[in-house]
Amino acid sequence: MKISYLFFVIGIIFIGVTTKVAFESNLDVLKLDSLEMVLVPGGSFMYRQSGEYLKDDFPIDAPLTKVKFEKFLEIMKYQVSVGDYEKCVSDGKCEPRKWQGKQDEKLPATGISFNNALSYAQWLTKNSDYVWRLPTDQEWSYVAGSKYVDDALKSDKVNLSISDRWLEKYQKYAEFNFSPVGKVSIRGFFGANENGIYDLSGNIWEWTSDCYNRTRLNASGIELNTTNNCGVRISAGSHRAYISSFIQDARGGGCSVGAPPSYLGFRLIKDGKRDVISRFLDLTRL
Amino acid sequence: MMNRRNALKSAIFATMAVPALIQKASAEEAFTPVAEKVDLSKFKRKKIELVKPPFVHEHDQVAKGAPSVVEFEMTIVEKEMEIDDEGTMLQAMTFDGSVPGPLMVVHECDYVELTLINPESNSMPHNIDFHAATGGLGGGALTLVNPGELTVLRFKATRPGTFVYHCAPGGPMIPWHVVSGMSGAIMILPRDGLKDPEGKSVKYDTVFYIGENDLYIPKDEDGEYKRYESPGDSYSDTVEVMNGLIPSHVVFNGKVGALTGDNALKSKVGETVLFIHSQANRDTRPHLIGGHGDLVWETGKFNNPPERDLETWFIRGGSAGAALYRFRQPGVYAYVNHNLIEAVNLGATAHVVVEGEWNNDLMEQVKAPIAFGQSYLGKKALP
């Protein structure tokens, strides 16, 4: 009896020590350079819902709704850098980027698919005390502040026909494409917004966690149903782009629609502390 | 590395490599044939200001009066040009400063008289070969001009059609000058205008001139496109890429996106557009997404009846073709090289934005995309 107690106690101490060691954040070792964070206080803003809206079978602008954040949001000051992403690649947890020449490690990482960004967030979470994740489209739009562009047509014309709407949209996207494309620039090149977040709506679009959706309303505006397609995600920038989750380079764009994003990259939100269970699950996966 | 003098030298050697005829005349001077003078004093002369593509100078579709001597002037400009929106640069060589060179329009039996200027600021000799012209290597043998020289060439427009012109300064300089941007097109209209297969007159409201270029930009060891000080500096690397026959870019009007977005072409429902498509080096296959070719002179030669209702037409490398289309439905049309890899990934896409009233008889969205469940499937199931 006494011996089994002893084993039990030794066991507990052993688990305690190993978990303590394993729980220790690796961030000091990794020396990542995109971990500078910005705290954006809670508040509210007018948000243009993402996705497509059909009213009585005709495309309309998505509704504008007031969105409130009770708590602050903590988001990366800069986009994740080439060097940081490459560390995840050499750790075997992130897919190598394609079609990119050799780049300075300090440059923002581009050629990143949604799936790549997700892998990076998981890898970073595993190496830290916190949960790291992509922002939702709402969160991104909120912290982007003045850099957030409402992409609704807001046409003056009533009863736009399908082709009128199409043409107006084309024109609007042509205007959106004012963003300087050019080469990938050093971090900070596109300046900071009023929250102190750099390079928003520059020439690198940033992945959000939102899926593409299409919502149908009846003639009186009552929501009928929504189709969600999570194979396509929203990439945020000077206009919203809906892009398949495995695409690393969207520059080719489509045949006949609008302006594609110049480059695809991302930044992450730092969420609450990780709980013991998630850390323990990590251990069992080691 | 090739400096200006070497570039000059190699161009001269290259000239020596072409037919003996030229060598006999002179290796360094343009070939000047001696023959009976032609008296053109009775012909009217008119001077045309050329216009940058994709547009074309004003012209009559049906000739007014007797054939005349039509004077054009082009200045050859060597300059660095951006060929996409990512800062990729080409040491371009151009006719009159644009890629492609401007479209010239005359009528059958007119005389084309071109003043070709090679300014001192250029580094290389150039010339011009008109596929529309007869003899003298299309004019190439008579027009080789060094920096600081000009020449005047006259040729008779004997065959109606759309034809390519390009620089052809001899040997390996020929393909290099062409893929550096030195090509354009001339349209020689029948005196009584264009005709359908039944011989009925047809008119167009607008001409869009699409010059397609295959470009071969070398990359450095890091995979970045290289930039060069001068055309000569870019030569040896570029030839290596050219000889692989796989272009890095395939563009309309000299640049990826030159004819999309803010620069998209514009038309209206009911308007008839003549699309002229030239490719001086490589085969291509224009296609208008959502539209057709009502009448297509695939080989571009107006003495042959046009074909009707084409979906895609074939432009042989080294030729220009013409397609006439009346827009019937508003919206955005993509005019592409229907090798879709070249269209979407390498750049060969233009857009035409067409205004007007939507015609539900031609096309209607009977049901907007809708989520469907078992009940819908059940209705469609076989009894």
Image (spheres, coloured by chain):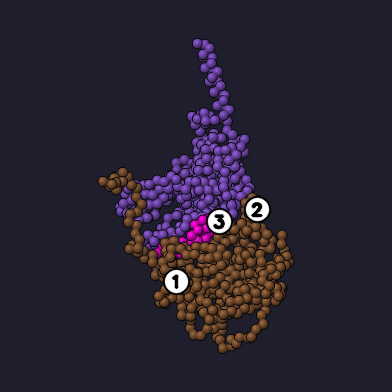
Q: Which amino acid, by three-letter code, is at mark 2?
A: Asp
Q: Which residue is mark 1?
A: B306
Q: CA distance from mark 3 to mark 2?
A: 21 Å
Q: Are marks 1 and 2 in contact (CB under 8 Å)?
A: no
Instruction: Give me the residue at 47% from left, 55% from top.
Output: A254
* Disc 1 and disc 2 on one polypeptide chain: yes
Q: Quadrant of residue B71?
A: bottom right
Residue at x 40% of width, y 64% of height: B330
Picture coordinates of residue B359 (x, y %)? 35, 64
Q: Residues under labels 3 and 1: Cα distance?
A: 42 Å
Chain letter for the brown colouring in the rendering? B
Which region shows up in magenta?
B330-353
Residue B261: give x, y in percent of width and height.
49, 61
Which of the two marks, 1 or 2, is nearer to us in this view?
A: 1
Residue labelled with disc 2: B220
Q: Earlier in the sequence, mark 1 or mark 2?
A: 2
Would you name the residue on which mark 3 appears?
A: A181
Q: Please identify which colour was used for chain A in the image.
A: purple
Mark 3 near mark 1, Cβ–Cβ under 8 Å? no
Q: Does the image show residue B56? A: no
How many C-alpha atoms fall within 10 Å of the one at disc 2: few (<14), some, or many (≥20)?
few
